[in-house]
Image (cartoon, grey):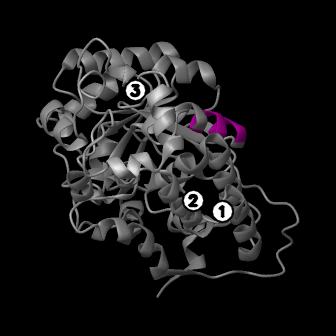
Amino acid sequence: MRLSDCHNIDDFRKLAKARLPWPVFDYIDGAADDELTKARNTSAFDNVDLVPDVLAGVGKIDTSCTIMGRKSALPLMLSPTALQRAFHRDGERAVALAAEKFGLWFGISSLATHSIEEIAGLTSGPKLFQLYVHKDKGLNASMIERCQESGFDALALTVDTIVSGKRERCLRSVFTTPPRFSASSLWSYATRPYWTLNYIFSPKFRLPNLDGHVQEGTGKAVSIQDYFNTMLDTNMDWDTAARIRQDWGGTFCLKGVMSAADGRRAVEIGADAIMISNHGGRQLDGSRAPFDQLQEIVDAVGGEIEIICDGGVRRGTHVLKSLAMGATAASGGRLYLYALAAAGQEGVERALAILQDEIERGMRLMGVTNVQELTRDRLRWR
């Protein structure tokens, strides 16, 4: 299978699976426990049908929107994800350059493999930094200050990782950061020489946003589950979120909100946006899908705060359904991670081109010329 054979996001998944050692692929693809919630994140979109209008004169359409004060060419964001150089040697650099080419928001993680400063210097496009609140308060302050100095456009505080979900695929593969070879996975690494040689001969794998504070993930191999359970602050509460918003002083988003009550609290502390998200199904298995919760949260706080439906997006129609339900935009991580793992920046660009085409074609077939025309009266529950 070649990159030219990829015509949808699932095709990129298949190509990534063929090119990555299985522990690395399973880190991207896996989720918590029985992975029920991960599956629901995408299947939830099937519960609602689109109702198109015809004869609408759709020769010219406008797919753009404003997200957290910045213009976006599409109502789509690339969610922050960790450890990207484990999937392809160019990591976040490739995603940043692809996002800028398509005029999209993208985010980097606290556990990114390129630094805040490097990514800021690489692109003038809209950039979001995803903050994990560590027990080390100096580290939290350092990351916020570095983002301020580097001109990041928004800070997203992740609120759903108080402890790690049980990611059983990673437990079976003993996946760590940095990746390390184990007896059970050695054959998989050996039969993926392109990935393995790139990993061995590329610059040392590190998590530069943690520099000067913790060795875990850079100089000391650790599983993500152990990292979350030992390094992150389980005492984080709404006062913590309000304090971080104040310390940051700029556009502020909460990532991981899943209830209308928490949406209301986000409004009360002055957040500019919320990302309805369950961390890609990697935390609380058996929880609702973001799209399933979207209507309830929009009805509670829509118009008072921007609402981004994060997770499970695999098609342009998923984006259109999110907007029609009341979201400002949709976002996802795996939708570009599979493509990154499959073919680096070229892969991400091809995936985004496919999604752009699906969004444009879907709008024309829906009979809308701009995203504001996507309203709830164009949806029907099955």
Q: Which residue is mark 1?
A: 6
Which image quarter is the N terminus in?
Answer: bottom right
Confirm whether residue 237 shows in the render: no
Judge from the rendering whether residue 60 lies leftward or rightward of residue 381; answer left or right: right
Secondary structure beneath label 1: loop
Residue depicted at x 26% and y 58% = 169
Q: Nearer the viewer, residue 156 or 347?
A: 347
Residue 51 is situated, as x and y percent measured from the top left of the image, at 63, 82
- Whichever of labels 3 and 1 marks the residue nearer the N terminus, that label is 1
Q: Amino acid at mark 1?
A: Cys
- Whichever of labels 3 and 2 marks the residue nearer the N terminus, that label is 2
Residue depicted at x 71% and y 75% = 366
Q: Amino acid at mark 3?
A: Phe
As drawn, the label of residue 205 is 3
Q: Which residue is mark 2?
A: 12
As drawn, the label of residue 316 is none
Vertical arrangement, residue 135 with respect to residue 99, above or below: above
Q: Residues within 10 Å of mark 1 (few under 14, many from 20)?
A: many
Work out how far the residue at label 3 is from the one at label 2, CA to CA, in angstroms. 24 Å
Q: Residues within 10 Å of mark 2 (few under 14, many from 20)?
A: many
Residue 109 is situated, as x and y percent measured from the top left of the image, at 40, 34
- Are the residues tagged 3 and 1 within 8 Å (C-beta)? no
Residue 288 is situated, as x and y percent measured from the top left of the image, at 29, 67
Q: What span is in magenta?
A: 95-101
Secondary structure beneath label 3: loop
The secondary structure that most of the magenta stretch takes on is: helix
Residue depicted at x 73% and y 61% = 357
